[in-house]
Amino acid sequence: MNGEELTEQETALYDRQIRVWGVDAQRRLSKSHVFVSGLKGTAVEFCKNIVLAGVGSLTLNDDNPVTEEALAANFLIPFDENMGGGGSLAELCCDSLKDFNPMVHVSVEKGDLSSFDVDFFEKFDVVVISCCSLAAKKSVNEKCRKLSKRVAFYTVDCRDSCGEIFVDLQKYAYAKKKADETVECQLHYPSFEEAIAIPWRSLPKRVSKLYFAMRVVERFEEVERRKPGETSIEDLPNVLKLRNELCLAHSLNESQIPDSLLERLVVSTKEFPPVSAVLGGILGQEVIKAISGKGDPLKNFFFFDSVDGKGLIEDISTS
């Protein structure tokens, strides 16, 4: 990622951005390689943002066909596209993203996310997965951690008016300005599996209720062997039962995971475009920070709920 200098064409195209975060940050961006799997509304918002920012390459992975839900949430799909025919989501998004910034190399990687081995992720600097199962999150994160180089790993999930971002930068060094000097800082991140394994009773009392609710729904989908978002109102009694069991096991008061919040997550599984825009913007900002090494990165969860309009950062780690 520390390759050659910016070309004259890149310097001219990214002039305004260079004025904001500097030529070195833009150079790092222009030489970076990003992988994104799961192309629903939030992920495509993120893709649009980093393509406009000028990353070196973006690889897309989503073999699913176009559906009515995808047409409603994914603005990269051409208006005249028919459902069920004409290419996968990744292929259609690839064509549209190339028009946003011809200097970014956008490509498609076909195949199931679980089929990619450790070596596959070696070629990337950033890996972002969306709409994935609990097992997939753990597996891909672990594969990234096995590499000799640091690969920044992110998950993003949006359910109706709620959303969550997880960040794993492993051992991360960055610079930030303090008064009139630049200070070198370092953070240590847990993996996704390590973070969610922390007993709930040991977490701060004011941790976001959305953190607990997402873990309940995630666990329910795993136990029932459902794909992410394959839930409905009929599942609510069993989800509430699982909530009670998990709260008992973790010595957590059930009021920390309200019935009404779980009902929203279980029933309204489609992505709400305004929330996708918020999450995609935050995720893009965080990836730019991680690549450039400038600014305080998010550690390690971000939650957004449009009901109260609040975005919360939670450090769910042992350190």
Image (cartoon, helix red, strand yellow):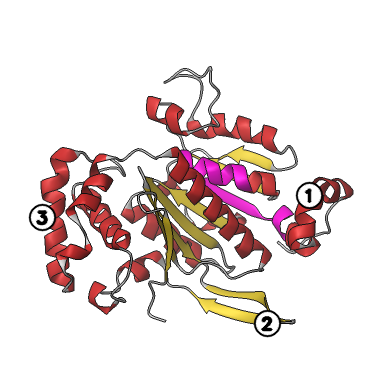
At label 1, counting other C-alpha atoms closer than 10 Å, the crowd grade (few under 14, some 14-19, many 20 or more) is some
Residue 78 at what x, y percent from top left? Answer: 55, 23
Pointer 1 or 3: first along the chain: 1
* Residue located beneath label 1 in the image: 14
Q: Is residue 30 left or right of residue 96?
A: right
| Location of residue 29 by image quarter | bottom right
Residue 83 at what x, y percent from top left? Answer: 43, 20
Amino acid type, label 1 = Tyr
- Point out the image quarter for the N terminus: bottom right
Position of residue 155 relative to residue 179, above or below, is: above
Alpha carbon separation for disc pair 2 and 3: 49 Å
Q: Which residue is drawn at 67% across and 82% down?
A: 183
Q: Is residue 219 left or right of residue 178?
A: left
Q: Do the residues labelled 1 and 2 touch (CB within 8 Å)?
A: no
Let me know if residue 230 appears in the view: no
Task: Name the foreground residue: 295 vs 62.
Answer: 295
Amino acid type, label 3 = Lys
Q: Are marks 1 and 3 in contact (CB under 8 Å)?
A: no
At label 3, counting other C-alpha atoms closer than 10 Å, the crowd grade (few under 14, some 14-19, many 20 or more) is few
Label number found at residue 183:
2
* Residue located beneath label 3 in the image: 241
Q: Residue at x 21, y 46 (%)?
A: 263
Secondary structure of the residue carrying tag 2 is strand
Per the rendered image, the range of residues in magenta is 27-49
Q: Do the residues labelled 2 and 3 touch (CB within 8 Å)?
A: no
Alpha carbon separation for disc pair 1 and 3: 53 Å
